[in-house]
Amino acid sequence: MKKITLRIFTVVLGLAAFCVVGCSKKEAAAKPQKQAAVKAEPAVHYKDGTFHAFTDIKDDWGGNAEITITITDGKITACEFLSYDKDGKLKDEDYGKTDGVIKNAGLYKIAQAALAGAAQYGQKLIQTQQLGMVDAVAGATVSHELFQNAADIALKQAKAAN
């Protein structure tokens, strides 16, 4: 009986040690990859001015967006991002309403949360100075794709102006 208990204990102890060693190696391996992904883009020199662009893609519902980026002393100092529905109407406090009325409170709340999330992208671009460092905001991932597209077009204009 003692031999069986000792064998079971040895097997359980061995499995526990294997799990601890295996998990610690995965974490150690994951850290360098994560750090490598956060590496800064090479410094980009932009010409001062205001650069404006519309997306050359549409969102899932046929809408698009526009961006206006201001560069001062080679740095992004202002960024305005606006989204439009498929009919060209600005997405604002009425976005998510039907015929000007909130007919589905849940959908309206989701639509407004998406707008609030998308409103953060311009400020994040100003803070990071790198388009690749502007992460998607939960609830505004479709807008993130539009933001990335429009900002890329505008920033290419700013680079080409050099």
Image: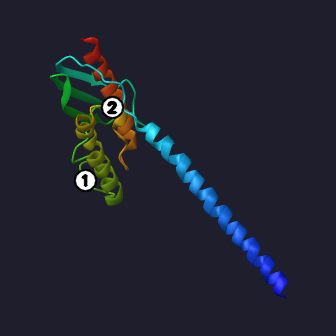
Q: Position of residue 76 (x, y in %)?
A: 21, 28
- 70 vs 116, left or right, is left
- Residue in the picture at 27% in, 35% down: 125
Front residue (pair 104, 56): 56
Disc 2/disc 1 C-alpha distance (Å): 36 Å
Asked where in the image residue 147 lies, by quadrant, the reply is top left
Residue 118 is situated, as x and y percent measured from the top left of the image, at 29, 42
Task: Please give the residue where the numbered disc 2 appears in the rendered image.
Answer: 131
Foreground pick, 85 / 122: 122
Residue under numbered circle 1? 101
Instruction: Find out whether the residues at labels 2 and 1 contact each other: C-beta distance under 8 Å.
Output: no
Tell me which amino acid carries mark 2: Leu
Residue type at numbered disc 1: Val
Of 19 and 139, the residue lying toward us: 19
Q: Quadrant of residue 150?
A: top left
**Residue mark closest to the camera, 2 vs 1:** 2
Q: Residue at x 35, y 39 (%)?
A: 143
